[in-house]
Image (cartoon, helix red, strand yellow):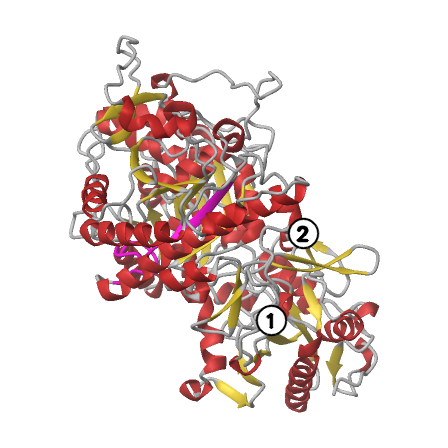
Amino acid sequence: MDCDPNIHQSPPRQGEEVLDQGKMGLVVILVGAPGSGKSTFCNDVMVAARRPWVRVCQDTIGNGKQGTKLQCQMSATAALKDGKSVFIDRCNIDQEQRVDFVKLSETGADVHAVVLDLPAKLCISRSVKRSGHEGKLQGGRAAVVVNRMLQKKELPKLCEGFSRITFCQNESDVKDAVKTYSALGPSDTLPAGVFGEKSKESKVQLGIMKFLKKVEKPDKDDSGKDIIPDEHVTHDIIPRPASVGNTCTMELENKNEDDVSMNDNSSSQRSFIGDNHGVPTLAFPSISTADFQFDIEKASDIIVDSVSDFLKRFNNVRLVLVDLSVKSKILSLVREKSTKKHIDSSKFFTFVGDITQLYTRGKLKCNVIANAANWRLRPGGGGVNAAIFKAAGKSLENATKECAETLSPGNSVVVPLPSNSPLHLREGVTHVIHVLGPNMNPQRPNCLNNDYIEGCKVLCNAYSSLFANFASIFKDQIRNESKRNSSGISDSHNLFEGTTSTYSHDSDQKIKQEGHYNSEKNKKYKGFPYSHASKDKVSIPHEDHGYVQSEAPSDVLASNKISSNSMSRAIVDCKIGNNKRSAEVRKRTWGAWAQALHDIALNPEKHKDVVMEMSDAFVVLNDMYPKAKKHILVVSRLQGFDCLADVQQEHLSLLKKMHSAGAKWADRFLREDSSLIFRLGYHSVPSMRQLHLHVISQDFDSTHLKNKKHWNSFNTSFFRDSTDVLEEIEKHGVVTVNDDEKLLTKELRCHKCCSAHPNIPRLKSHITNCKAPLPTHLHDGKLVYAPSNCASGTSSNLS
């Protein structure tokens, strides 16, 4: 295994002692499918260990029985407080499963990942043969579970917060890793970095049960050429059309069955599937009723009511509720209730089958599908989310990042599907709408703890947002088709009046280039809505911050009571000079964890214990996890002012006030310690909501500075100096946002002499002794320091 097992045991040099003493322990997060050998790894290390270890296993944490993730976190925290190191023995197969354990680094512990990426056949063989397993996962059932987990595997990365990741590709690698961790003494450390990772050219390991699958041959495009799908796309079991009762179905084809064609005895009931390819169609799953455990009875009521309200406003559209199981309770409840409500079955019906194969296997053409997403808008988690990301390939993941970074419950976001996506090529899907509903599962984020009053409200908002975004898609498609056709679409407006309209399946090819979200930046001062000349846009009061612009028709918004946070913000490319790319405004929704600064800024009187200074324009407070000796934040109090992408010419005076406040606090700190040097600036893409100015000393002496992302966010062009921001606003009215994620993963270099270092401890040790001055490009008014500290640069007037 390509790994450096050397353990640092030498006495710490000056500057290193604080780093070692600050560590309370070590957390090793095991990553691997059942049968990969996680428990064996832990036991082998603990038998020969030179430091005290605690194994935290969810299968046994509940008094020998299966427990919860929260119990695991509490047990790990308690062990670290006792000075012990911890193994997290869970599958931890994707980032969402790991994120809470990575946060244990906040206790001062070092967090490692050991990835047991062993061959799939070995994992299934072990799982099937074993007996007496702690989690009762053995026999034939284990094979299915392992296969499902490998389908949604998401390998860990340093940017998640790990200081070291070790990949084990075979049993020899595992033995080496066991020796490495067994040899660690109580005060020993390991080098940071990634070890043993496969080369990028290596093939991705397919699911372990591919021998049970009948892999279909490559489809052909219109020119007759084979379609080459995106990487990471694997083939599913092939279904074929069938019919059960009044529900359209796709029956799974078993390899051992005779290939006998199904007789469709209810063709009259299914005739509308193939005869209405020109009708805009949305296929969607039941939101929140699977992993989020929302009550099915209540969910079915909300689905039927939301569909009924929507179809009263739109005539020539179709909505399709999809589920994999013929015995689906949610489908039967919705069918029964929609019949009682007399909803037209040609406009709304249920469908049994795979939402990613509706056309190729069920002859149901849906140009838009909805995804029951997670808040991170990333693959993983199983179910519909995993299936859609897998079927659409890497292109959907990239397109999603262009539209949004996170999603909060009750909201949705439209993602135009790239034309090279297999889901676009095979199924004709042009858009995916990610939607997030309420969660009642205590083991998932943002659990409402069975508060169904709030839960029903959030689920209503989720469906309202989903249907409104669907409406905006086909409205834009018709508008673009009209632009390309000199004769226009004579009946396009009738789509919103309940009459017939023409629709072209290919009419949305240029939507992304032409700007699908054509809303404009909203005025947010004094809480007044921004009025726009276009009759197609309406201003909706936002619950938290100002107003947003929506492209959905006003009658839909009124009927569905859509809150503004359900609607997508604009994607706007601002230009400076000769096509120079500047601030790209993206839709950005914020998780609960990212709301802290927003809450403090809007309600500072409730946070007097942390607010150091307060005015009508801003508040000043210490960074909760400072990355240097002195690190404070000047936070704007303007509602809806979340990040640099929101900045316009009208905000110049506010930013000048924030800059002046930051400079004054820097001067105050300099009177206490004249050796400090300060820099003022903004992150291009902040992790916390509400625009805030960093005032940070350049010593970077802090136990909270732990990884590349922390360092590079302050020492690359990702960090925009306040003086440069003010200058750009004065000249151009917008700010250049350097949001390239590669900036945060650049190699570690000293911010003074630019020397390269392999890890954060080495870099910190170097900085302590580095006598080089700060770079000359920072001397032009970008630094604040005491007049006596002239060796580091030239004094500047920052007030």
Q: Which residue is mark 1?
A: 701
Q: Is residue 190 visible?
A: no
**The residue stretch that appears in magenta:** 431-448
Tell whether 210 sits left or right of 525. Answer: left
- Which residue corresponds to the image point at 31% horizontal and 13% vertical from the top-left? 255
| Neighbour tally class for label 2: few under 14, some 14-19, many 20 plus, Cα within 10 Å | some
Identify the residue position indicated by label 2 in the image.
747
Q: Please, is residue 301 above or below residue 487 in the view? A: below
Depth order, front residue of 37/633: 633
Looking at the rendered image, the disc whose residue lies closer to the viewer, 1 or 2, is 2
Along the line of sight, which residue is nearer the eye, 393 or 426?
Answer: 426
Q: Amino acid at mark 1?
A: Asp
Who is closer to the viewer here, 277 or 629? 277
Q: Position of residue 145 (x, y in %)?
A: 29, 33
Dominant secondary structure (helix, strand or loop) of the stretch shown in magenta: loop
Circle 2 — which element? loop
Q: Residue at x 58, y 38 (%)?
A: 507
User: Would residue 321 be seen by someone viewing this image from the given angle?
Assistant: yes
Q: Nearer the viewer, residue 678 or 658?
A: 658
Quadrant of the snapshot with the C terminus: bottom right
Q: Type of residue at label 2?
A: Glu
Q: Earlier in the sequence, mark 1 or mark 2?
A: 1
**Residue 234 at x, y = what percent?**
45, 27
Bin the neighbour count of mark 1 within 10 Å (Cα to Cα): few under 14, some 14-19, many 20 and up: many
In this picture, residue 747 sits left or right of residue 348: right
Asked whether 397 falls inside the magenta stretch, the response is no
